[in-house]
Amino acid sequence: MIVNNLITANTAGCGGGVYWAVPSGGRGPFLINNTLSGNFGAGVWASDSMRKLSLINNIIVAPSFDVGVFCDTTRDPNPPIFKSNDVFGLSPFPSSYSGCGNPTGVNGNISGDPHFVDPANGDFHVRPGSATIDAGTSELAPATDLNGTSRPIDGNGDGTAAFDMGSYESPAGGPPAELTATKTNSSGGTVGFGTRWTWSITVANSGPAAAAFGSGQVILRDELPNGGDHLRDCQCCQR
Ligand SMILES: [Ca+2]
Ligand SMILES: [Ca+2]
């Protein structure tokens, strides 16, 4: 059992993150709730007997030009068992799986950016709203995470506690609101003196969570364009 590990920034010819060669008929390792990122030579390199291997609830991010999971099918053409993993390759030359088929979309496996908090500085927790939150299976999942926090937690705010993918369980709560402001001008080009025009400002919430505001709270200030005393005068006249 290889459980709750953070394996990053390693390099090897075969299996920068994890390598195994399982004798024929052997059970093989179970790789469960690990986070692997930035490993060159494949995040996971599986060799020899593979049909009894299980990869469950892992986040595996491959550097560009490398691969997340490589299966050496020379001795066994059967791929490992993949359940509820996020295996994702970074651009511009992404590769998630090689030699393993592609289980994305089957048995809870996904392939997308897990949105680590600050991978450049070693923080591989995921941000709120990550698709890896509450996306794991309870099958063989550990009762705690790498920090010792109890699993599972309702990390997406839908009322149901479920296991996350990766080595960390995200805290309770849902993804945040995401506000986008758009300003639309009714007139293009130059506006003559004394001519009225309008612009409208729309603020939309594209996040899954509701946005809450305090009474009298200023959420947006709009500056008038530069270089136009006339513009400012005109704005004053409309009040
Ligand atoms: Ca969770
Ligand atoms: Ca949930």
Image (spheres, grey):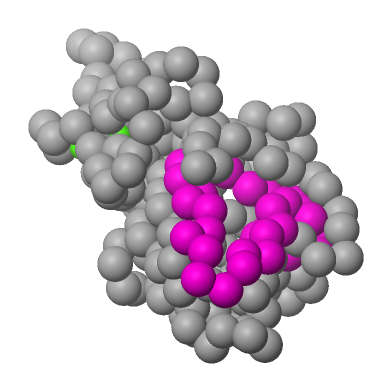
Which residue sits at x=79%, y=56%?
16
Which of the pair 239/83 is nearer the observer?
A: 83
Q: Give the range drawn in magenta.
A: 16-44
**Vertical placement of residue 94 versus 90, above or below:** below
- Quadrant where ligand 1 appears: top left
Which of the pair 122/51 is nearer the observer?
A: 51
**Looking at the rendering, which quadrant does residue 179 occupy?**
top left
Report if residue 224 is visible in the image.
no
Q: For the C terminus, which image quadrant? A: top left
In percent of width and height, residue 76 lies at 56, 84
Which of the pair 183/204 is nearer the observer?
A: 204
Which residue sits at x=58%, y=55%?
60
Number of numbered labels in the structure image: 0
In percent of width and height, residue 180 lies at 39, 45
Which residue sits at x=48%, y=51%?
30
Residue 198 magenta: no
**Looking at the rendering, which quadrant does residue 213 occupy?**
top left
98 lies left or right of 170 = right
231 lies left or right of 228 = left
40 lies left or right of 135 = right
Which residue sits at x=40%, y=17%?
149
In percent of width and height, residue 57 lies at 41, 49
In percent of width and height, residue 7 lies at 69, 41
Report if residue 49 is visible in the image.
yes
**Vertical placement of residue 131 versus 65, above or below:** above
**Vertical placement of residue 212 versus 32, above or below:** above
**Looking at the rendering, which quadrant does residue 163 occupy?**
top left
83 lies left or right of 137 = right
Q: Which residue lies furthest to the top in this view?
A: 215
